[in-house]
Amino acid sequence: MIRINENYSKLKASYLFSDIAKRVNAYVAANPGKSVIRLGIGDVTEPLPPVCIEALHQASDEMGHRSTFKGYGPEQGYAFLRDAIAQHDYAARGCPIAADEIFVSDGAKCDCGNIQEIFAQDVRLAIPDPVYPVYVDTNVMAGRTGPNVDGRYEGITYLESTPANGYVPSVPKVATDLIYLCFPNNPTGAVATRAQLTEWVQYARQHKAVILFDSAYEAFIRDPQIPHSIYEIEGAREVAIELRSFSKTAGFTGTRCAYTVIPKSLVAYDAAGNAHPLHALWNRRHTTKFNGVAYPIQKAAAAIYTDAGKQQTRDLIDFYLGNAKLIREAMTRLGFSCMGGDNAPYLWVNTGRDSWEFFDLLLNRAQVVCTPGAGFGKCGEGHVRISAFNSRENVEAALARIAAALK
Ligand code: MLT
């Protein structure tokens, strides 16, 4: 008799953003005349930078000629893209990351969901609360947790991000093995200072742990004091994996391209205590289960590292940060305290009310979609996340509607 993976039964019935989409679709069906503005899921709205479009066209033409046609590419990504990443995202910031330590993929969501499979079943997890749900759900699916009791899975050390710690958790008092960190943070928009990241790297070194550092939103950092990469911290090459994405940096949510960095100096241990390089394990996994990102997409991604590409992506992000500033100002005027929006595309609004109730209120009275904080974890209760990814016109209209609705 074929059986299911019963770990799936521990999960909530549906993924947070599918759940929200269902509610919004039901509202739209019941209220056909009303226009809904979506500031919920962090999906970009502005077109791809012109350099990317040009590269896509050129690369597509190459695919139409026998002499330049490409079949399977290297699973880890083409050298032209890995070299550009190593040079512009790492060497330029003084981070010693080599091109062959970079694995190009079709998304940071897939990478952060898949990476857990190279670790032992019984590793001790440290996961922030609130958190991007993929980190938790994929470990639940893999059987690394007990059941969900009162909104928390047994077997996870939760790293609480609250107003009291400025939404940046400190290292736990207990030892853990696999630590998920995300800065600039999704959902809170908080950033971590060099001192805070140093504390995490030291903790990981002390416990022979690994940090999964998700920096999908690093391009939104405008404060020059804030590190963009965990590898700006001394000693991180021995304890950290970094995940990055072109999704939010260059509008690739529908185009799909990302990368994961695994330094060759990073090891984990077998039951006998022997060290094994994680680079080799991930390479084995990647070559077995992945066949590379399409050539035209990698060409488009590489185009953002040209001078014109750098300017165009900066302008794109400045545009969203302009939206974020407007949201922050408007919500502050309404009397809410807010985190984020200055070095991140997300505003984390402390509403002091039940977060699903506040979500329903904004949907029903203002036709604006946000994301209820409780969907990101227990500590998200009392908050909502507002995304800056939309047109200026829609953001301004949404803010006017919210102000009128909350009067
Ligand atoms: C979010 O809204 O949290 C993100 O869009 C999710 C993602 O990047 O997968």
Image (cartoon, rainbow, N blue to C red):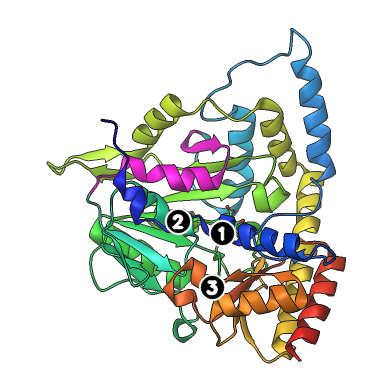
The residue to which callout 2 is attached is 13
Q: Which residues are magenta?
A: 100-121
Q: Residue at x 60, y 27 (%)?
A: 78
Q: What label sits on residue 341 in the rendered view?
A: none
Q: CA distance from mark 3 to mark 1?
A: 13 Å
Q: Compare marks 3 and 1 and give the one earlier in the sequence.
A: 1
State the residue lying farthest toward the right: 393
State the residue lying farthest toward the front: 30
Quadrant of the rendered image holding ligand 1: bottom right
The residue to which callout 1 is attached is 19
Question: Could you say which is closer to the camera, residue 405 or residue 179?
Answer: 405
Q: Amino acid at mark 3?
A: Gly
Q: CA distance from mark 2 to mark 3?
A: 18 Å
Q: What label sits on residue 373 in the rendered view?
A: 3
Q: Residue at x 59, y 85 (%)?
A: 351
Q: Quadrant of the N terminus?
A: top left
Q: Compare marks 2 and 3 and give the one earlier in the sequence.
A: 2
Looking at the picture, how far across and down is residue 404, in whole percent?
Answer: 80, 86
